[in-house]
Image (spheres, grey):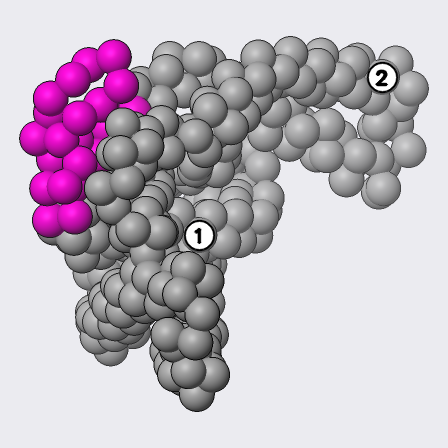
Amino acid sequence: MFKFFSNRKWFLWSILGSIFILISTWYQVQLDVRINEWFGEFYDTLQKALTTPNSVSEKEFIGYLFTFAKIAALWILIAVFTGFFTSHWVFRWRTAMANYYHEQWLKARLTEGASQRVQEDTLKFARIMEGLGTGLLDSIMTLIAFTPILWELSKQIDVLPWIGQVNHALVWVAIISALGGTILLAAVGIKLPGIEYDIQKEEAGYRKELVHGEDDPIRAAPPTIGQLYNRVRGIHYKSYFHYLYFNTVKWSYFQGMVIVPYLALAPTIVTGAITLGFVQQITRAFGRVEGSLQYLVKSWSTIVEFISVWKRLREFETKLHSIENDTNIINNSESR
């Protein structure tokens, strides 16, 4: 699965491509930091204009809007090109995997569902890695950039409701709420990776029988195909049940987190100690830090699918190596 990074043929794409994605993602995060600063300045100006008529000129106000437009346009340009490049980069990764399996096909074909693993599982692996990989990189970069900002802004927020005095309060609220959500969702969804793996396994058996039935009228007969489909139905129903309570907990957590930063700011807001611009700036920074810390929570369903695909490909490669070792032993015995 990871020969993309060890094969010299793919050096330019694997290593230099990774560096390019890293740099472009970091630049996007820096633009996001600049947008966060803009929010603070803009909403302070907005509050000033609304409370003191004619204190802000129309030219000055519109100037803020054009400043945002320039930053946002650059962010969009970088994001679109980075996404385009990343898609090509990940497809090269899939190609490296596919080439290896093609070279080993005489042995690979002996494994049940080999065609599905070479075609469908490598496709899923590439697509999932594109989403999870870029998401993880963005989360790490965002944490590095926004945590110091939130830490600095939180100097003015030192009181929490029902708790009292806490230095840099919003930083600790973000860490504890995200960590608590991650542990909660991991505990609730602990059975999902195994169920997803079973779904893929049962679907593969069902599809294989149908494929054989295209050439052999004896195969895919009603009793056999009916039994296979009943197993597919059973595992899907089991999946629906487990996702029912998992999604209930997940969406309850996310909806609850909407009010958390405002709840934490409540004692400071009601005393009028901060401005509207500061509220916007710190809640946005809080959202970026908390959102990055919630990477596992937000990506759990995709991670479940990735674990299933990874287990299938690892099992496939293990069987390839086993067949190769058995072939070597036979050849050595015959040569003697």
Question: Would residue 226 be counted in the magenta stretch?
Answer: no
* Residue ID for mark 2: 226
Residue 251 percent coordinates (x, y): 54, 25
> Crowding near pointer 2: few (<14 within 10 Å), some, many (20+)?
few
Of the pair 62 and 189, the residue shown nearer to us: 62
Q: Can I make out residue 231 in this image?
A: no
Residue at 8% from the left image edge and 30% from the top image edge: 167
Residue 293 percent coordinates (x, y): 28, 37
Instruction: Report how far apart the C-alphas of labels 2 and 1 lie in the structure.
Output: 36 Å
Of the pair 16 and 11, the residue shown nearer to us: 16
Residue 145 percent coordinates (x, y): 18, 57
Q: Can I make out residue 30 in this image?
A: yes
The three-letter code of the residue at mark 1 reads Gly
Q: In which quarter of the image is the C terminus?
A: top left
Q: In this view, does 4 lie above or below 185?
A: below
Q: In which quarter of the image is residue 112?
A: top right
Residue 201 percent coordinates (x, y): 58, 26
* SS at badge 1: helix
Magenta range is: 152-177
Of the pair 117 and 176, the residue shown nearer to us: 176
Sooner in the amino-acid sequence: mark 2 or mark 1: 1
* Residue ID for mark 1: 131
